[in-house]
Image (cartoon, helix red, strand yellow):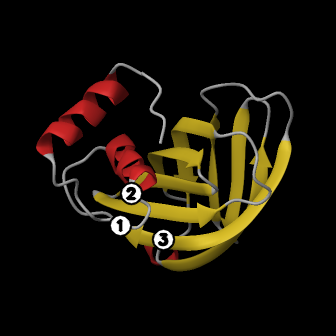
Amino acid sequence: MPSAQGYIKFANSRLVGTFDVDGSPRYLSVEVKPLNQPFECIKAVLTYGSIEQLVGGCKWMGTAGTEDLQMFLGPDITIAGPLVTPRLAALSIRGAGTWDTVEGTFSPQDNVSNVLANPSLPPNAAVKDPARAARVKQLLESNTPIIV
């Protein structure tokens, strides 16, 4: 089954992620229930049956473990990877959301940060302020926590 590397971050009751699927970035935005402490997975691996599965709505379930994330989004779709910061306890999570394509030149982390900072924007909206985009990129590269 094909796989793709990506980045996922949970904040503000949403889990957003970007994956490079055969040169076509895919964006995932889903609600998370129950709400709990934020988490981040910078080395997430998406495994899927066909690229056609990565479009439209999805329901999912999974586990935010003490050290890793496991998500099941359909018969042949999983996302897994290590968490950046260990959690105190494992938590079963679930939700619903959508897949979309991402346009633009931002890295997966930039796309995720842009959407978390601007939840009213569509997933492919570009940051219009070049100085802000440069600052976000600088913060991400230095691994400085970004509070949104």
The residue sitting at 71% across, 61% down in the picture is 72
What number is the disc on residue 121?
1
Quarter of the image where the N terminus is located = bottom right
Above or below, 100 relative to 137: below
Q: Earlier along the polypeptide chain: callout 3 or callout 2?
A: 3
The residue sitting at 71% across, 67% down in the picture is 95
Q: Earlier along the polypeptide chain: callout 1 or callout 3?
A: 3
- Horizontally, residue 118 falls left or right of residue 93, namely left
Question: Where does the image place residue 50, in percent across and percent down from the top left?
Answer: 49, 72
Foreground tag (1 vs 3): 1
Q: Quadrant of residue 38?
A: top right
Kind of residue at badge 2: Asn
- Compare residues 50 and 120 and report the one nearer the observer: 120
- Secondary element type, mark 2: loop
What number is the disc on residue 99?
3
Kind of residue at badge 1: Leu
Is residue 50 visible to us here?
no
Circle 1 crowding by C-alpha within 10 Å: few under 14, some 14–19, many from 20 = few
What number is the disc on residue 85?
none
The residue sitting at 42% across, 53% down in the picture is 19
Above or below, 106 relative to 142: below
Is residue 91 visible to us here?
yes
Instruction: Identify residue for label 2.
Output: 118
Kind of residue at badge 3: Trp
